[in-house]
C-alpha cells in the first residue's frame, strides 16, 4: 500500500504537468483542430461534391484518398507541438523557475504526454470525421482496416515526436528546431528516398526514412495488402512528351506491416534515449 | 545560536578550466538572512544553481537539514525542494495567467490542495498583484514579473528562501518594496539567502554577509564585524540648522581638536584629505574615525554635550553601503596579497 502511495506521489508532478501543458497549448490546439476540420471537410465533402470528381468505388478507397493529407498534418503537428519541449526551457530560461520544483525528466515527460494528448486528439478528430463521411457516403459498417490505419498513425506521430524531441534536446532555439525538423522530415527524407530509389531501385528499401514508414498509414488500407511492394511505371514512348523515349520509374509503395511497426518502435525508443542522454548533459 | 540549516563544504564548480566556485565553506543558521555579495561573474548564481540542483558540484557538497533529520547531503535527498524556495536569475514564465502558474507550482510542491487558493490570494495581496491574478504574464511589467518571481519562491511556504539578484531591473520604488518583503520574511522567522552585486540592497537587509570573489569566499560576518578590517570608518551627522559660513572654519578646527583621539589620522587620501568634512547641501558632517565601536559612542557624546551651542545633531548614522564597498575592496586587495593570484584556472 505504502509503495503504491509513493508511486502515485512520484507520478503526481507528471500528471500536473500534463494538465498544465494541455492548458498552455490550448490556443495552438484549437487552431489545429480548425485546420483539421477544414481539411477533412474539403477532402471528404467539397471535393466529392464536384460533379466531375467521381466518388471512389469503395469505402476503403475513400479512406485512402482522405488520408492523403494525414502525413502532412502529423508532420506539422509534431514539429509545432514538440519542437519547444526541451529547448524552450533553456532558451526562454523558464527552466530556472521549474527545474528546482520538479525532477527535470518528470517535467519533460509531463510536457511530452501533454502535447501527445493534443496531437493524438487532432488525429482522432480527423479519423472520426473521415469515418463519419465514409458512413455518410457508403453506409455502415466502417471498415475495420481504418482502425489499424489509426493505430499506425498514432505510432507514426509518436515516432515523429520522439524525433523532434531529440532535436529539441540540443538545439538552442524553438524556431530553429521547427525549421530544421520540418526541413528534414518534409524535404530531407524525400530527397534521400528519391536518390536511393534512383541509384538502387528495388535493391534497397528506404526503411531508414520516416516519410517512407509513414506510408504504412495508407498502405495498410489496401486490401489485399500490396504484394509486391515495389512497382515500376513506364512513362513516355510513342509520340509522347518525352520525344518517344521511355522512362521507367520505380516506387516502394509501403513497408511491410511487421517491419514498419518494428522500425517505428526503434525510432521511438532510439530517439528518446538519445534525447535523454543529451538532455542530461545540458546545463542551464 | 540556532541550528545550521544549510552548509557548504568545500563546494567547487568548474566549467572546463574555469573555476566558477572555489572550495566554498559556509554555514547558514535557521532564521538568518545571509547576503552573498560579489561582482558579476563572482560565482553567486553558480552557487545558487548548485543549491537548486540545476548544476552538480565537481567536488564538495551542500548539506541541508530536512524536516526530521540531521544535516544530509543535498544530492542524496530527493524531497528537499519543498523546503526551499528559489528565485534564480531574472524570472521567466510560461505565458499563462499568474493564477494558473502559481497553482501549478503549488501543486508541484505538493501544497495542500484545499489551501492553494488561499495561499495564492494571500501572496498576491501582499505583493499588490491581486488585480493581475487572471492576467497573462506577458502583460506584466518587469517589476511585476520580478514580484511574481518572488511569489513563486514563496508559494509553498518554504523554510529557506533563496533569492538571486531580486532587485535586478527594478525601479527604486520597487526595490524598496522588495526590501520590505525580505524584512517581512525575516520577521516570519524564515531563513533567507540573497545573492546580489548591489551592496546597498544587501547591507540594508542582511544579518551577515558573505563576500565572494572569483569563486572564493573572502569574508563572512556582519557588516560591523567585517568593517573591523578597515582602518577608517565613517559617520554621517545631519544637523538641524546649516552652519554659518563665517563660523565654519573655527568650528571644524574645534571639532578636530575635541574628537582628536577618535579620528583616523592616517587617512587614505583616496578616501579624504581631512578627517572631518562639512557638506552644506546635505547640512551634515562626515567624520572619518578609527572604526572602534567605543569611539563611535564617544564621538556622539562629544557632539551632543560640547557642541550644543553650535549645532543640534538630528541624525547620527554609519553608512553601511560605502563601508561595505570599502570592506569589499580591501578584502579583494588582501586576498590578492595573501594568495598571490586570486583566480586559479582549475590547476
Image (cartoon, rainbow, N blue to C red):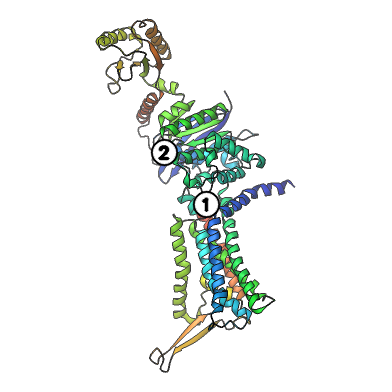
Mark 2 lies on residue: B169
Q: Nearer the viewer, residue B186 or A40?
A: A40
Instruction: For label 1, count other residues whose C-alpha is less than 10 Å away and answer few (under 14), some (14-19) or many (20+).
Output: few
> Which chain does tag 1 point to?
A
The one of B185 and B86 positioned closer to us in this rendering: B185
| Residue A70 appears anywhere in the view | no
Location of residue B126 in the rendering, given as x and y in whole percent from the top left corner: 54, 33
Quarter-of-image position of residue B211 = top left
Q: Of discs 1 and 2, which sits in the foreground?
A: 2
Which quadrant of the figure contains the N terminus of chain B?
top right
Of residues B86 and B146, the one drawn nearer to the viewer in this rendering:
B146
Using the rendered image of the protein, determine whether residue A269 is visible from the camera's viewpoint. Answer: yes
Q: Which residue is mark 1?
A: A280
Query: Percent position (x, y) of residue B137?
Result: 50, 45
Chain label for disc 2: B
In the rendered image, the residue lying farthest to the right is A1
Quadrant of the drawing holding the C terminus of chain B: top left
Report how many numbered discs are placed on residues in the image. 2
Q: Nearer the viewer, residue B43 or A63?
A: A63
Q: Residue at x 48, y 41 (%)?
A: B145
Amino acid at each position: 500500500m505504502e509503495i503504491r502511495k509513493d508511486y502515485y506521489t512520484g507520478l503526481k508532478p507528471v500528471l500536473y504537468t500534463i494538465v498544465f501543458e494541455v492548458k498552455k497549448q490550448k490556443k495552438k490546439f484549437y487552431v489545429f483542430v480548425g485546420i483539421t476540420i477544414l481539411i477533412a471537410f474539403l477532402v471528404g465533402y467539397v471535393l466529392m461534391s464536384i460533379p466531375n470528381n467521381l466518388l471512389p468505388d469503395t469505402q476503403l478507397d475513400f479512406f485512402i484518398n482522405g488520408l492523403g493529407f494525414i502525413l502532412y498534418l502529423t508532420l506539422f503537428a509534431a514539429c509545432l507541438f514538440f519542437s519547444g519541449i526541451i529547448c524552450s526551457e533553456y532558451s526562454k530560461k523558464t527552466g530556472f523557475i521549474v527545474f528546482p520544483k520538479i525532477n527535470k525528466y518528470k517535467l519533460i515527460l509531463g510536457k511530452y504526454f501533454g502535447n501527445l494528448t493534443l496531437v493524438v486528439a487532432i488525429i482522432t478528430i480527423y479519423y472520426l470525421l473521415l469515418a463519419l463521411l465514409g458512413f455518410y457516403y457508403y453506409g455502415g459498417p466502417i471498415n475495420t482496416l481504418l482502425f489499424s490505419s489509426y493505430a499506425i498513425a498514432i505510432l507514426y506521430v509518436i515516432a515523429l515526436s520522439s524525433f523532434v524531441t531529440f532535436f529539441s534536446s540540443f538545439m538552442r532555439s524553438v524556431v530553429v528546431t521547427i525549421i530544421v525538423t520540418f526541413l528534414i522530415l518534409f524535404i530531407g527524407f524525400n530527397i534521400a528516398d528519391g536518390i536511393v530509389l534512383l541509384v538502387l531501385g528495388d535493391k534497397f528499401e528506404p526503411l531508414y526514412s520516416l516519410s517512407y514508414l509513414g506510408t504504412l498509414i495508407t498502405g495498410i488500407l489496401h486490401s489485399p495488402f500490396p504484394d509486391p511492394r515495389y512497382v515500376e511505371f513506364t512513362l513516355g514512348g510513342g509520340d509522347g512528351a518525352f520525344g518517344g523515349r521511355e522512362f521507367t520509374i520505380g516506387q516502394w509503395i509501403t513497408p511491410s506491416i511487421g517491419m514498419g511497426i518494428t522500425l517505428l518502435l526503434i525510432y521511438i525508443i532510439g530517439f528518446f534515449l538519445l534525447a535523454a542522454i543529451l538532455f542530461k548533459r545540458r546545463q542551464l | 545560536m540556532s541550528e545550521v540549516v544549510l552548509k557548504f563544504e568545500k563546494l567547487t564548480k568548474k566549467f572546463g578550466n574555469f573555476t566558477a566556485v572555489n572550495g566554498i565553506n559556509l554555514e547558514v543558521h535557521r532564521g538568518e538572512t545571509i547576503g552573498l555579495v560579489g561582482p558579476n561573474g563572482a560565482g553567486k548564481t553558480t552557487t545558487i544553481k548548485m543549491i537548486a540542483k540545476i548544476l552538480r558540484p565537481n567536488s564538495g557538497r551542500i548539506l541541508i537539514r530536512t524536516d526530521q533529520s540531521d544535516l544530509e547531503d543535498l544530492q542524496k535527498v530527493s524531497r528537499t525542494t519543498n523546503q526551499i524556495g528559489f528565485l534564480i536569475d531574472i524570472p521567466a514564465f510560461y505565458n499563462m495567467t499568474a493564477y494558473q502558474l502559481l497553482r501549478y507550482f503549488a501543486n508541484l510542491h505538493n501544497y495542500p490542495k484545499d489551501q492553494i487558493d488561499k495561499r495564492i490570494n494571500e501572496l498576491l495581496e501582499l505583493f499588490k498583484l491581486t488585480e493581475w491574478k487572471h492576467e497573462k504574464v506577458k502583460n506584466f511589467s518587469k517589476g511585476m514579473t520580478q514580484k511574481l518571481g518572488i511569489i513563486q519562491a514563496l508559494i509553498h511556504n518554504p523554510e529557506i528562501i533563496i533569492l538571486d539578484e531580486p532587485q535586478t531591473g527594478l525601479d527604486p520604488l520597487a526595490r524598496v518594496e522588495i526590501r520590505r518583503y525580505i524584512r517581512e520574511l525575516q520577521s516570519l522567522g524564515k531563513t533567507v539567502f540573497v545573492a546580489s552585486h548591489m551592496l546597498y540592497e544587501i547591507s540594508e537587509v542582511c544579518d551577515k554577509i558573505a563576500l565572494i570573489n572569483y569563486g572564493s569566499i573572502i569574508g563572512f560576518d556582519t557588516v560591523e564585524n567585517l568593517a573591523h578590517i578597515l582602518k577608517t570608518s565613517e559617520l554621517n551627522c545631519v544637523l538641524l540648522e546649516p552652519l554659518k559660513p563665517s563660523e565654519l572654519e573655527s568650528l571644524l578646527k574645534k571639532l578636530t581638536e575635541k574628537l582628536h583621539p577618535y579620528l583616523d589620522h592616517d587617512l587614505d587620501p583616496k578616501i579624504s584629505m581631512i578627517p572631518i568634512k562639512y557638506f552644506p547641501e546635505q547640512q551634515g558632517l562626515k567624520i572619518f574615525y578609527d572604526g572602534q565601536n567605543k569611539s563611535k559612542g564617544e564621538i556622539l557624546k562629544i557632539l551632543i554635550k560640547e557642541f550644543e551651542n553650535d549645532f543640534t545633531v538630528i541624525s547620527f548614522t554609519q553608512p553601511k553601503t560605502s563601508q561595505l564597498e570599502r570592506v569589499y575592496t580591501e578584502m579583494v586587495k588582501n586576498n590578492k596579497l595573501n594568495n598571490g593570484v586570486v583566480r586559479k584556472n582549475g590547476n
